[in-house]
Structures are given as C-alpha cells and as structure tokens.
Amino acid sequence: MKTRQLTTIRITYKADSTLMKGVKRSKYDQDSGLGYKSSKGGRKQLRTIRKTGGKNNRHETSDEANNDASDELKQPTSAAKDGSDALHKSANEAGHQREAYTALLTLLKTDHSSMKNDGTKSNVKNGDSTLSQKPAWGGEAEDEEEDEELAIENALVDQQDDDDDNDLGDSDMANDDETLIDTLESHFNSVPDKVLDDLDAAFKVKSVRYRSGKSPVGPSQEYIYSRPALPKDPPQQFELPERNRSISPYFVKQKLKVQNDLLDPSKNVLTELQKELVDPIFQYQDLLYEYSGYEQESEYRDLYALHVLNHVYKTRDRILKNNQRLQENPDQEILDQGFTRPKVLIVVPTRDTAHKVLTKIIEKSGIDQVDKKGKFQDQFFQPSATIKHKPKSFQHVFQGNTNDFFVLGVKFTRKAIKLYSNFYQSDIIVCSPLGLQLILENTDKKKRQDDFLSSIELLVIDQLHSIEFQNVLHLSSIFEHLNKIPQQQHDADFSRIRMWYINDQAKLLRQSLIFTRYSSPFANSLINGKCKNYAGRWKNHTLVSPDKSSLGQLGMRTRLIFQRFDLAGNSAIDEPDYRFKYFCSVIVSNIVKSTGYEDGILLYIPDYTDFIRVRNYLREKTSILFGDINEYSEQRQLTANRALFDQGRTKVLLYTERLHHFRRYEIKGVKTVIFYKPPTNPEFFEETVRFLGKSAFLGVADLNISVVRCLYSKLDGLALERIVGTERAAVLTRGPNETYEFK
C-alpha cells in the first residue's frame, strides 16, 4: 500500500538580537506582554521557515526506509560518513533551536514579569497546609507508591510522536456536516486580539466587572450567567446566551454521532439534566454545577465525555487539514496549535471515578482498539464491597478503588486509544490532585514539570465535594500551573502557535467545568477567582424548601439554636478569628455554666485548623475535661476516647468533619451537640443530630433537655440554606436578631 509522504515544516530561530528586532510593540504592550498590532505583525521576523522533505523528512515512507537500508549495506563507508554529517548537522540545528527558544523565553518573561506578582494564593478554608502526615485510613503500600512514582516519572520523558498519529481522523472528515455551529472555531479562533489584550490588562489591574443575569428553571432551580466586562464598556441591555436545549445545532464529529445515536436531528436523546447543561458545555462557557443526587453523575459525565472527545477529534483533524494546506502553499500562515499536545485535563478524587470516566470516554469514542486496557482494568477497577451499616452516600463515595494517587495519559490515534501514554504525546490527562501534585511541586526540583499543562483548553473537575475532603491546596496548585509558558522546547512548530498562547492569554479561553454534590465557598472561589473565560460562566442555584432541608428530614424534635456572630465589617479573611473569639467568650462559658447536661457534649468542628486552635485553647486556658478524635488519630486513640466519652469520664469530645466523612462513626453518649461551623454536607448535620435520638432511645438523654447549637456568620449562607431552607437561611443571615431557635 502506498504511503502518502507529508512535508515537514521546521523552524530555525535566529539569534536573540534578531528576535528582538522582529517585535513591534503596540499601545497594549505594557498591560498584556507581547502586544502585536495584529495576529500577523512581527511573526515573520520571529523566525525563518525552512522547508525540508524527501530524505530529510522525519516521517519517511516505508519504501524509502527499505531502500536506504539496502544502500547502507552496499556502501558502508559512504553511509557512515553521511550519517555522521547528518548527526552533526542535526545536533547543530537542535542546539540553535534550544538557544532560540531560550531567547524567546527571556523575551516573554521580560514582557510578563508583572504576572508573577499578580496571582494571589486562595485562602483555603480547610487549612490543609498543616496536614503533612498521612491520614489514618490511607494509602497503598510504600513499594506500590514507589512503582507509581516511577511510572509517572517515565511518562514525563518527552518523546517523538508515533507515525500513526499523522493519520488521525482522515477517514472521518468527509462526512462531517460543517454547516452546523462550530463553537470550537468561534471560541478559539475568532476572538480579536484587541479584545483579549484589553481583557487581559483589566484582569491584571483587577478592574474587570461581571454582568449577570438569571434564568429560572422550574420552581426550585435557577441558573446564573456572568460575563466579564471592561469598565469602559458602554452600559447596554444584558442578554443571556442562546439556549437550544439540544445537541443538534452543534457541530459534532460524524464518528461520534454514529457511535452515540445522534444522526437524527429531530430526535432529542438528552435527559432533562443534559438539556440544561448542553448549551454551556458546547458553547465553551465555564460551569459550576451542583447536582442533586449521585445517580445524576452518569448523566453529566455522558455529556462532558462527548464534549471532550469532540474537542480532541476536531482539534487534531484541523491540524491535519492544515498540514495538507501547507503542502500546497508553504508560505501561508496558519495558527492552530499550542505549545504542547495535551488539551484536556480531567481531575477526579479516586481511581474508581477515573475508571468510570475513562470507560465512558472509551465507549463513546467509536474506537474499538484500546491499548493496555487490561493493565488499566487491573490498576483502576475493584469490585465494591457493600457496607450495610454505613449510609448510602458513604457507600457511593468510597466504592471501588479509593486510591487517590494517579496520573494517566490518554492518546487518540485513527485506529486506537492508547492508555498510559507519555504525557507530552497525550490528548487527555486524567489525574487526582495528589498524583499531579507529585509532578508540579516535587521535592526534587529537577523532577518538577508543568510544561505539559501549558496548552490545556478544557478542564474538568468531577466530584469536587470529595476532593475538598482531600488536600484542597493540591487543587489550588493545579490552577497556578495551568497555561503557563513552557520552560523548555517540546518539538513545537512556532510558526503555527496561536498568538494568545504566546501572549500568555490562554487562561482567558480555557473552559472549566466543575461538578459537585454541594456548592461551597471553596467551589465559588474556584469559579469566581480562578476561571477567567471571556465567554462567561454559569452557576446553578437550588432553592431548598423547608421540607427538603435537613430540619425537615430529621424526623425528631429537639431544641436547635442558631447563634450568629458579627464580622464588624471585616473581610472573609478575618472570619476564623471572629468565630474563635465568639466561641471562647460565649460558647465556652455556656459549657462551663450549662443549665442542661454537664457531660456528653459533642463539639463538631469542620476545619482542621480550627480544631487545632480550639483544642489548644481548651487545654491551656480552661479546666474542661475533654477528649478529641480526628482524621490523624491512631485507631487505639479513636477507640479509647470514644469509650471515655460514652462512659462520661470526659465531658466534651472534639470531633472533626473529615473524620466523620471517612469513618461515619456513630458516637455514643451524646447529650448535647455544638456545631463550631455549619457542615457543608447537610447529611452530616442530620447524622450528628441523630446521635441525640439514639441516646434518647437508650435512655441516656432526654430530648426535652438536650440542645443543638450552631455557630454561624453571614458567610455560611450556602450551608445554612441546605440545613434550614432557602427562606429561613435568608432570615438567619440578614435578620436583626443574633439568635434563632427551632423546635
């Protein structure tokens, strides 16, 4: 079979002075780095393009390779000499290329020096910087972790692409209906440079303002859309993006339509949930979605898996089409690439979730051959063991393989999906925050890398509520390393790199999709502070009725007292200090002079840093007899302190939310419950309050005497809404009183 020979375009960079000479600075230069007057201005001077073909082509045909081998046998002396000369020439070219790339990096760093000071680290609610040791529940054996680390390091070794990669999608292009809405083209290739320059400059000086609008969906759901705007933009009527509630108007690859039964445009195969999400996802807008039940995870994954595949296929097909165009006219300028190949990053909490996500991607891909599928099945799949005495939500979160240390590259070719591919050759990277952290912030500086994240165009964070109970600093770190200009050259064709990549503006076009069971301040900080998509962002808001709230689901009557403390006009940064002061002055004195039970007081503390602070205060400043259990306690300490509390030998028991998340203990001997802060998960509130019901059933406590106290501020509105309902939460956070009681 005759193999079609592709002409390769290589870049030979001139000296540093030539690079500097070719750059024309515009009036936007001071704000946005390399500010060219147009997308073409100055690019010819940045490089000289040398066309190489025939024997010098890196991707030679098999016939030519056989002929060359025969010639070498006949003329060994000449071949050796030619090979030596070619090797010397290649080495010189590589050296010049590295020097030029270093010069380009120097230029970019000079123009973007202000960016390093622009990023601010998020204030993480969980205080996970103190969590340096492993939790009591966790992890694999040390030798397995070492093997995993070695595998990740090997996957970072930059290698050449396989030859079959050049044929990706050739057979699928002819049948595509390109008259449909191609949002990939409009989002990534049709935005004027000046729009991105102005928006980038505004983000740097923090002058961007968001215009918002609401779209109600039924009686208990609304979607909020926000789009960034510049201060100089004239006020105009705000319009929400078009909502088609169908996938038919969007350009989806024919292979995916056939595989996923999407050929009939009149047939809407989407569920109600998918109809709400299809437009934000396929219009490349950011999304923070709070789903209402674990059974909905499969629905939204079906949708974003299709979107991910469509993005990968269309991106690679466009490059192949442009390769053909360049063969016909090598002098034309085509901008269709990033610094590196990976375009999609999917962050999930456990291997079980990764297995579910990748299985969906494989099923929807239309590709039958999957390399190393058996290895993937062995390392990521594990049958779920039913734990009948644990809640259903616990069984769902901790089903299957709960290992949270992995990074996996996935590469797509025309014929196969290649799992465990080299990161720099991968199209999709699936990881846990901990696994990626090993690479981004490795203690060995020589092993640190983030270049493979430089060209991520689509970020998916699945099950954020579970990731929040891991180390959220790892997730924040990922955002800090996304879309940075690479430190090294990775076989990139700079004649085809989009200008917004070179101008360090990729974060303005990256789409971020975040899915969580429960919205939280941390989730809002990600979508509001880390996602800067010029196309805007969507968030859904669920209105909780009283009967659907935790209070409505309790099924028992007892006194519930909600006590609010005032921030005195200060920012959220000072909130932990005001909470602690209020606790020490009001709650502790209540414990000492309690008119109810003097023992059996359970103090529930969501944040580990707050737990340390309260424990130290009770130990050093009071004479209260207390015990404590947390996620880092050894098993014998957990057992002993729970027994002492049940026997009444300790008056107060400090109990962390993360321990409850990972163990779901049923604490015995509870007569009074104090929430230092409202739980993010309303199920935790219900389960903890029901400890009182069990004590009452055993005759240990009287519900008429028992009390539940919850300390809160106006910043706890999201958690309160799920506990007491939307209308009541508004009264609690904005009402004139500081204390509210429910019975």
Image (tube, rainbow, N blue to C red):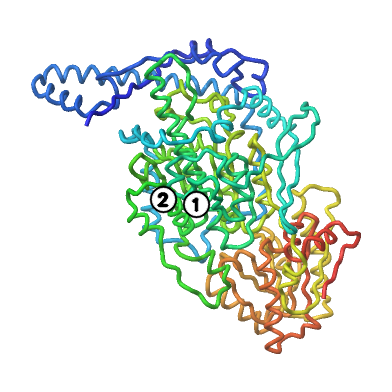
Percent across and percent down for residue 284 are 59, 39
Residue in view at x 66 percent, y 79 percent: 645
Q: Amino acid at mark 2?
A: Ile
The residue at 74%/51% (across/down) is 216
Q: Position of residue 390 (x, y in %)?
A: 56, 74
Is any atom of residue 130 visible in this view? no
Identify the image quadrant of the C terminus.
bottom right
Residue placed most toward the observer, 691 or 659: 691
Viewer can see residue 140:
yes
Looking at the rendering, which quadrant does residue 283 occupy? top right
Give left or right: position of 104 versus 569.
Answer: left
Q: In which quarter of the view is residue 101 placed? A: top left
Q: Which residue is mark 1?
A: 432
The label number, if any, that marks residue 294 in the structure image:
none
Left or right, 559 with respect to 241, comes to right
Q: Is residue 640 above or below residue 399?
A: below
Mark 1 is surrounded, within 10 Å at the Cα level, by few (under 14), some (14 to 19) or many (20 or more) other residues, namely many
Residue depth check, mark 2 versus mark 1: number of the one nearer the observer: 2
Q: Which callout, 2 or 1, points at the residue further toward the start of the chain? A: 2
Q: How many circles with numbers are drawn on the protein? A: 2
Q: Which residue is mark 2?
A: 362
